[in-house]
Amino acid sequence: MNRRRREARAELVRQYLETITSDEQRLVCFHLMRGLEPEEICKSMKISRERFELIKTETAIEMRNFGLAPEDWPDEEALDAI
């Protein structure tokens, strides 16, 4: 991923993170970005594995809808035109 593409994606991720209103969802995202394993996240947040999976699935759907799915990214030529 070139620099321009990384910067565009980082900006979109920042915008997405600002839309999260649930502290629980924000914490799950934080822990996942830090590389914690699901078991560690569940233990530290005192949530069930089912609750963790639900939060993770909801987040994935929201991110896809926000345009953060890999197939939603423009190709290199489209970025050069911007």
Image (cartoon, rainbow, N blue to C red):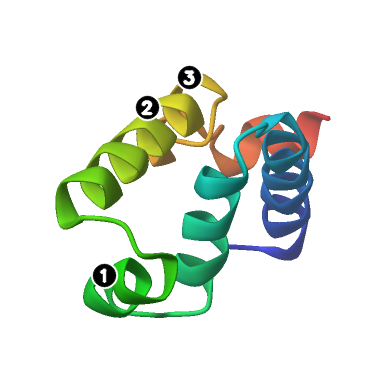
Q: Amino acid at mark 1?
A: Pro
Q: Is residue 28 above or below residue 51?
A: below
**x, y percent for residue 11:** 79, 45
Can you name the residue that lies furthest to the right here? 82
Q: Is residue 27 above or below residue 38?
A: above
Whether tag 2 and tag 3 are in contact, CB under 8 A, the answer is yes
Can you name the residue that lies furthest to the top here? 65
Q: Residue visible at 22% across and 47% down?
A: 53
Check residue 38 in the rendering and tell me which mark sits there, or answer none: 1
Front residue of 2/42: it is 42
Q: Residue visible at 26% across and 37% down?
A: 54
Q: Nearer the viewer, mark 1 or mark 2?
A: 1
User: Which residue carries the number 3 mark?
Assistant: 65
Whole-Å distance between the Cαs marked 1 and 2? 18 Å
**x, y percent for residue 19:** 71, 29
Can you name the residue that lies furthest to the front here? 46
Q: Label 1: how many residues lie within 10 Å, few (<14), some (14-19) or many (20+)?
A: some
Q: Amino acid at mark 3?
A: Asn
Secondary element under disc 3, as helix, strand or loop, is: helix
Whole-Å distance between the Cαs marked 3 and 1? 24 Å
> Picture quarter containing residue 41?
bottom left
Front residue of 46/5: it is 46
- First of labels 3, 1 by sequence position: 1
**Left or right of residue 47: residue 59:** right
User: Which residue carries the number 2 mark?
Assistant: 61
Whole-Å distance between the Cαs marked 2 and 3? 6 Å
